[in-house]
Image: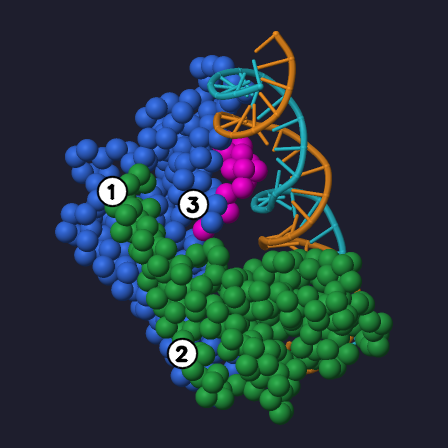
Chain colours: A green, B blue, C cyan, D orange
Amino acid sequence: MSATRLLVLGVVRMHGATGGAHGYQVRRELLSWSADKWANVQPGSIYHALKRLALEGLLEQVETPQGKGPDRLAYTLTGAGEDAFQQELQQRIVDVDGAAGGAYEFSAALVFLTALPRALAVDLLEYRLVQLDGQRRNVAAVLDKGIEWGQPAHVNELYRLWLAHCDADISWTSDLVARLRAGEYVMADDAGHDFGSAAPSATS
Amino acid sequence: MSATRLLVLGVVRMHGATGGAHGYQVRRELLSWSADKWANVQPGSIYHALKRLALEGLLEQVETPQGKGPDRLAYTLTGAGEDAFQQELQQRIVDVDGAAGGAYEFSAALVFLTALPRALAVDLLEYRLVQLDGQRRNVAAVLDKGIEWGQPAHVNELYRLWLAHCDADISWTSDLVARLRAGEYVMADDAGHDFGSAAPSATS
DNA sequence: TCCCGCCTAGTCAAATTTGATTAGCAGGCA
DNA sequence: TGCCTGCTAATCAAATTTGACTAGGCGGGA
């Protein structure tokens, strides 16, 4: 599942309480997060994702109050959609994979962090920490051995950069875990959880 | 120009001294850099890029010694291709743009850093440093003001992460500049520059 | 009233990416 | 010899992404 799909799924999920969301609404929400910068949310991708997700049974078309304006198709999450959302979200928090692309794969999940219960979020992030540490070790090893071995020197430079990013990720993640432990944010199992906690921006 | 295109252009350029490169050669070179991890180098993309670049006149099909094996189409850089390569390379070093996608846009350029004369590389990296500093300031400002303003809290978390990455980039870049100044790497204007300095991996 | 610009909502052709698949040849081995 | 495996080299249909463009309605100034 691409980052775009998780984002779309997640935004539709947020609007679940108010009877689903249509494409433009999703687009606006994502734009308000600058998701056009750090993920790729062109209009076309969103509408495509929406159709695809509906086709796969993760979303369901809900009949529109059909107000004024142009055509408008709204969607809600199905049960399968909720499952897929949870699964994908958790997967992404844990996965470290692609060094550089990874930062952006993770961002898509971070936005929905509060959709998880606090203890689970903490556990997953701690597991991520383990993964990150492993990756750090790996990169460091390549860098140590790699000086003399194959590859033009600049490829090592790449590893050096990744190492720095690993370190940054590790300390940021530790910090976040600590803050979550200390009770920051309203998580899914806290009183007053607002089901995704989007700033109210629906206009329909 | 996408990252893939710069990578393909750059690899073909490296093999310029030996009469051009064909798709599979490019693929292997990129795989040996793990570019399938941090950029997206599926076979199809490479062959597509090759054709497209040829169509745009940046590459030129060179007639093959036509040895044994399957069909094989080799390409070399044209004058326009060299210009485009230099321009794109320099652009990418300077551009900071997309926070998360940016790291990976930059990686594609970093690999070809030694294709620049030392002084130019240093200048460009220093300019990048200025950009990064600006970005850092921006993110920090949003983070300061942003606590109370709109957006669900977790979006701020994203900014916090970017801030950490900015810092990592800044110190890595400073370090690289210092090392370049101290004479590390064989740059385009140094004696013994091997025109891109790929580990010999041609097989043809 | 009429026109202009802007916001809402979404479509569509073209470009690109994905990754499974084809196909020739060489080497090992029974 | 005959077969199977693995490497070289590239193609192709299907999926996805890009981003320019259509089109209706609304508010306000001339």
Residue holding disc 3? B34
Q: CA distance from mark 1 to mark 3?
A: 18 Å
Query: Could one spot residue B139 in this view of the protein?
Result: no
Magenta span of residues: B38-57
List x then y, in percent, for residue A194.
Answer: 64, 86
Q: Nearer the viewer, mark 1 or mark 3?
A: 1
Residue at image x 76%, y 59%?
A56
Q: Secondary structure at mark 3?
A: loop
Of all chains, the one bearing label 3 is B
Horizontal relation, residue D14 to residue B187: left or right: right
Q: In the rendered structure, find residue A148 and report the number of the disc placed on it.
A: 1
Q: Evaluate if marks 1 and 3 touch, with contact meaning CB atoms under 8 Å apart.
A: no
Of all chains, the one bearing label 2 is A
Q: Are marks 1 and 2 on the same chain?
A: yes
Q: Amino acid at mark 1?
A: Glu
> Relative to D19, does residue B158 appear above or below in the rendering?
below
Query: Could one spot residue A11 in this view of the protein?
Result: yes
Horizontal relation, residue B24 to residue A5: left or right: left
Residue at image x 14%, y 51%?
B182
Q: Give the residue furthest to the left.
A: B182
- Position of the C terminus of chain A, as image quadrant, is bottom right
Q: In the rendered structure, find residue A115 and report the number of the disc placed on it.
A: none
Badge 2 crowding class, 10 Å Cα cut-off, few under 14, some 14 to 19, many 20 or more, is few
The majority secondary structure of the magenta stretch comes to helix
List x then y, in percent, for residue B23.
Answer: 49, 31
Does the magenta segment cover residue B55?
A: yes
Residue holding disc 2? A175
Q: Amino acid at mark 2?
A: Asp
Q: Secondary structure at mark 2?
A: helix
